[in-house]
Amino acid sequence: MKQTNIESVCVFGSTARFSADRLSDRDVLIIASDKSQRDDIVRYWRQLGWSVSVYSPSRFLKMLDSGSLFIHHLKVEGLITEDKNRWLENHLDRAEMKRSYALDAQDSVSLALPMERLNQEKSINQQLIAADLAYISVRNYGICYLADRNRLTFAYSQIVEELGKDFMLNKDEISLLQSMRIGKVSYRNGLQCSEITGTVGELRKLLSKFFSDTPLGEIEPDSPIRNLDSGYATLRDFEAWMVSAMGLDAPTHQSNKNISTLKKWICSPQAYSWSIKNVSARKLNTVKQVWECSLPMFTNCESDKFQSARQDDCRFQ
């Protein structure tokens, strides 16, 4: 018997919590078994300005069976707007948490490691990529750390407050972490930001309180791209090299199609919920060498090599 097409839509994040503000994304999950149908649904929501995470049913079920906290985010806070045959509702009902998320929490350090390339003396406002990296690493760490203590929390501001209590952070430290949100939004939208106080070095020192097993250090900005714990983190190490060593602001350098493509991967909500599989530092270092020899102009040939790095080594799981 032919399987009935699966089609589910679920709003999540601050919109579902009714706490959205001017800095908030509007997040929606799309699950559909028919690819053409899935593409049509995604196109519709993106045209409305939503940030879309899209999954096939099989990929979604793999995440569910792994105990992914993204699934529990949907289970706790998601608002299902469409659900053919109640497919999503039924599967969320059976979702169970893992015994421990301690290793997941410590693995979050890889999301902060690209900060090691940045000038530690400069203000965060001068290197807003630091705010973006801090936001992602703190949020991911906090979700896992708190879940390991049976405290399911997904709103960034609340995560910071909870971490502040557990790690006995002072008011200035909590305020600095809270300001990473506006820094991240400014960075990804190519805006200047003057609301963050402190240097990259001070921020790095603060993050080391969470990642005591792997303290954040410093490396030369032009050091080879590293294979970090996740493909997404490895890609961001490449981005940090562009910003620090090459003087390129990845998310705002719209005139170059290489960097515009990189922006789409980095800003995609499913890039860090799916994770990008097997991103090769070797391949990215090849692209790095090409760029170093030819900046500020990029040829179509170089762009082809960049696309090849993505196609060969950045396949989604």
Image (spheres, helix red, strand yellow):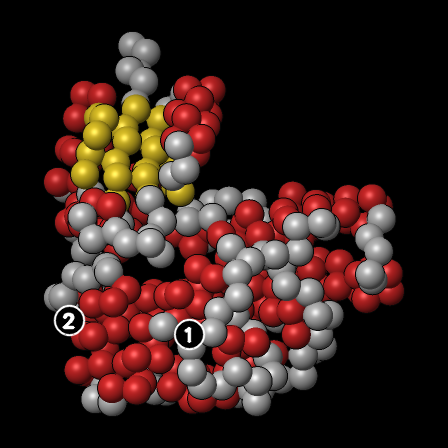
Quadrant in which the N terminus is drawn = top left
The numbered mark, 2 or 1, whose residue comes first in the sequence reads 2
Q: Position of residue 77 (x, y in %)?
A: 17, 48
Q: Which residue is mark 2?
A: 149
Q: Residue sitting at 15 percent across and 33 percent down? A: 90
Residue 8 vs residue 261: left or right? left
Q: Is residue 18 above or below residue 163?
A: above
Q: Which residue is mark 1?
A: 195
Q: Residues within 10 Å of mark 1 (few under 14, many from 20)?
A: few
Q: Is residue 141 above or below residue 14?
A: below
Q: Position of residue 107 (x, y in %)?
A: 39, 71
Q: Residue sitting at 25 percent across and 86 percent down? A: 171
Are the residues tagged 2 and 1 within 8 Å (C-beta)? no
Q: Is residue 310 visible?
A: yes
Identified by mark 1, the residue type is Glu
Q: Residue sitting at 21 percent across and 89 percent down? A: 168
Residue 6: which numbered mark, if any?
Answer: none
Q: Residues within 10 Å of mark 2 (few under 14, many from 20)?
A: few
Q: Position of residue 152 (x, y in %)?
A: 16, 61
Residues at marks 2 and 1, CA–CA distance in whole angstroms: 33 Å
Q: Position of residue 109 (x, y in %)?
A: 42, 74
Identified by mark 2, the residue type is Arg
Tell me which corner region of the image, top left, top right, bottom left or bottom right, holds residue 239. bottom right
Q: Residue sitting at 17 percent across and 82 percent down? A: 165
Of 278 and 232, the residue lying toward us: 232
SS category of the residue bearing label 2 = loop
